Image (tube, grey):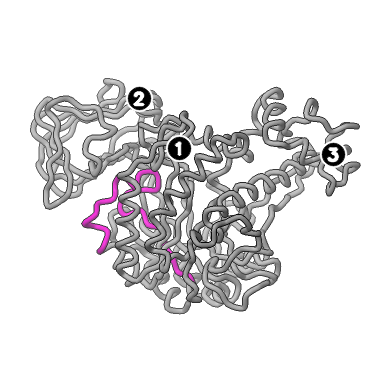
Amino acid sequence: MLLTFVSLWMLTGCQSDEGVDKETQITETTEHFYVKSVHYFSSAWPKTFWQNFEKPDVPKELQQIKNDGFNTVVLTVPWRGFEKNFSADKTTSVDAMYQRLDFMLQEITALDLHFMLRLGFPHDFNPDVDASILQLCQGMYTEEKTRQQWLDYLNNIKNIVTSYQSYSAGMMISWEDFWCPHFVFTELSQQERLQLAQTMGYSEWLRSSDKNQHAIKTLLGQNEISSANTAIPKKNEQSYVLYLDFIDHALHDILLLTRTVFPNTSLEIRVDKDPVKVNDKLIWVGHDLYLEDSHRATYWAPFWGAKNQGELLTADEAVEKFDYFLNYVTGDGINNNHVIEQFNFTDNTPYFPNNANIKPDEVNNFLVKAAPLLKQKSSGYGLWAYRDYADNLFYNAYFEQGLHGWQHNEQVGIQAINGDNHVHIKAGGFIEQSMIISDRVMWAVSYENMSFCYQGHKAGEVVITVNDEQVVQLKTETGRQCHLMPAELFKKHLKGKIRIQALNDVIMDEVKIYGFIQELGVYDHFGQPGPYLEGVRQLNKEL
């Protein structure tokens, strides 16, 4: 049943919750309000936020969010990093991370803000984790052990969240965090795709009684559907259209599993369409929009409905394309109950450099003009990069976890200054991390330069090396500083050991080496107001 007005996923979804202990359900707030949210990463970035955020900064940053007119904070909560030892039947919780989640919820609710949690965010650099992102993604579709570990993680989150349930604006999972069927499985060898089809139950699903068997056999080019001859298709096969439907089914099973712990969990649906090749033509196939659900999450950027030839749109053109998107995700008004929790009105992601964007001097105008459409055709919105962030290579770069994750010699220690951890590197001391650079920063091979930034407390001189080859020698200063370095050696040694060695006493914090800044233009990387802050504030007033 559709609601005439709702907040975010406040009501029980259409799926049955039979078997769930009603006494232990998280009961989300019943107050109906329009969700105005930001994803919060402090001065870090999504992949390192939980290790890095500095507690003294949190209250003032959350107050700023509230002052800008937002009422909800979205936290992306990793599975890897909050849990470790995935090779065991039962994982080991990283207590420090759950404690930091509890702290964050205390601070959010103290300001009378609501919170949403994106559960199962896959990215975290904790070196103690023994499972890759791909291993866990594949396991969720193929292994009961992994699914049970997922439930254990969810129950650990629930134990923290229960105390703050009156401020909960809901839980969600995203198709992006269970991405491997889309982007990995179809690229594997024939034998691997046959095996995966069996473990995922693909052929059984194809043979199910509610399917048109004649149509399926025609698309497969087979007279019989058996596990022995039915593999996950490649993207250039016509039967890929069947697999796309199956992926939606498999993801829905993960959603149902999650709802056994959090019954009102919503799904960030895949609003992008996928191409299926038919007679040298591409047919664009959409995914399940969950139009029957009373709570959904979506995302948007100006490329929707555009030519995507590098064009810059006027505010009016962008509004027209935004309306096209809204009509699509609502089923032409059938279900307006979705939160566009990634309202990416600008996007500088290098993946698709030809994607359309809005003319910079018309973005604020677009934001104001988008308000009536948002109000009419959604139940909320959110910003992903409320504060621009850099793709920092380092784990625990703010030293809030001491020296965990850093290799170092005895000339290195942690020094607390005004309650904030700094690293103190004496002359001859070094800190270093070993990593596959291209795993941590996927665009590394395209960088011409990298930036070395830090918060200096005691000036000195350092040498930065990659696999013992010197990148730069430079003098550090006090305060917030950045230095540009050539990226050549980082690209040469994509599997590398990055070292910072002190030639004399140095004290610093918030150490970053990065090549890309994700920009939205609300606040810059250093927390200073951006060109679109006033437009966002005006949008919030209109809503």
Horizontal and vertical percent position of residue 533: 37, 67
Compared to residue 271, the image places residue 204 above or below, namely above
- Is residue 36 within the magenta segment? yes
- Amino acid on which the number 2 mark rests in the picture: Gly
Q: Residue at x 40, y 28 (%)?
A: 436
Q: Which label sits in the foreground, 2 or 3? A: 3
Tell me how far mark 2 sits from mark 3, CA to CA.
46 Å
Q: Which residues are magenta?
A: 35-59
- Amino acid on which the number 3 mark rests in the picture: Leu
- Is residue 310 within the magenta segment? no
Tell me how far mark 2 sits from mark 1, CA to CA.
16 Å
Q: Which mark is residue 496?
A: 2
Q: Which mark is residue 219?
A: 3
- Give whichever of discs 1 and 3 has the lower sequence position: 3
Instruction: Judge left or right: residue 131 versus residue 214.
Output: left
The answer to which of 62 and 387 lies nearer the viewer is: 62
The answer to which of 69 and 103 lies nearer the viewer is: 103
One can see residue 344 in this view: no
Q: Element at badge 1?
A: loop
Horizontal and vertical percent position of residue 214: 91, 42
Q: Which mark is residue 92?
A: none
Q: Quadrant of residue 94?
A: top left
- Amino acid on which the number 1 mark rests in the picture: Trp
Tell me how far mark 1 sits from mark 3, CA to CA.
37 Å
Q: Element at badge 3?
A: helix
Q: Element at badge 2?
A: strand
